[in-house]
Amino acid sequence: MKTSELLAKIEMLPVHKARNLDSVGWADGYMVVQFRGRPDRWVYGPNIAEVERDKILRVPFPDSIFNKCVKAHYQAFKIASTT
């Protein structure tokens, strides 16, 4: 799957109560993350369950859950902002 196709499918949702995360999105086993104060996005995956995104949006400490459940276990690549 091309990156442009993936980004077209993803709806970015704001992460409340987070210090580092600004928004997350999920589609087809990939999670897209945008960090606060940075225009770039990071894609993590493949094979991430949608439940992981829901968990990050629901818990009181989303940065910690993201680091333990996603960042430490999946490959990542950066998508540079064009603006």
Image: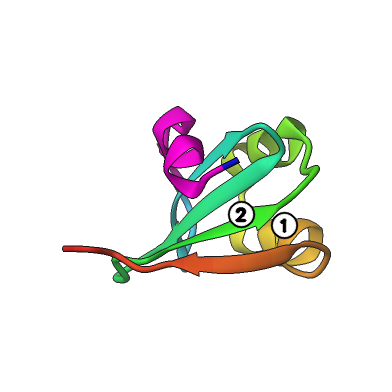
- Horizontal side of residue 59 vs 81, given as left or right: right
Q: Nearer the viewer, residue 81 or 19?
A: 81
**Amino acid tagged 2:** Pro
Residue 63: give x, y in percent of width and height. Answer: 60, 62
Residue at figure coordinates x 49%, y 69% from the top left: 78
Residue 76: give x, y in percent of width and height. Answer: 65, 66
- Horizontal side of residue 37 vs 27, given as left or right: left
Disc 2: which residue: 62
Element at label 2: helix
> In the rendered structure, which segment of residues is drawn in magenta?
2-16
Does residue 15 belong to the magenta stretch?
yes
Question: Badges 1 and 2: C-beta atoms under 8 Å apart?
Answer: yes
Disc 1: which residue: 65
**Amino acid tagged 1:** Ile
Q: Quadrant of the N terminus?
A: top right
Does residue 54 belong to the magenta stretch?
no
Query: Which quadrant of the view contains residue 62?
Result: bottom right
Check disc 2: other Cα within 10 Å, few if <14, some if 14-19, many if 20+. many
- Horizontal side of residue 55 vs 43, given as left or right: right
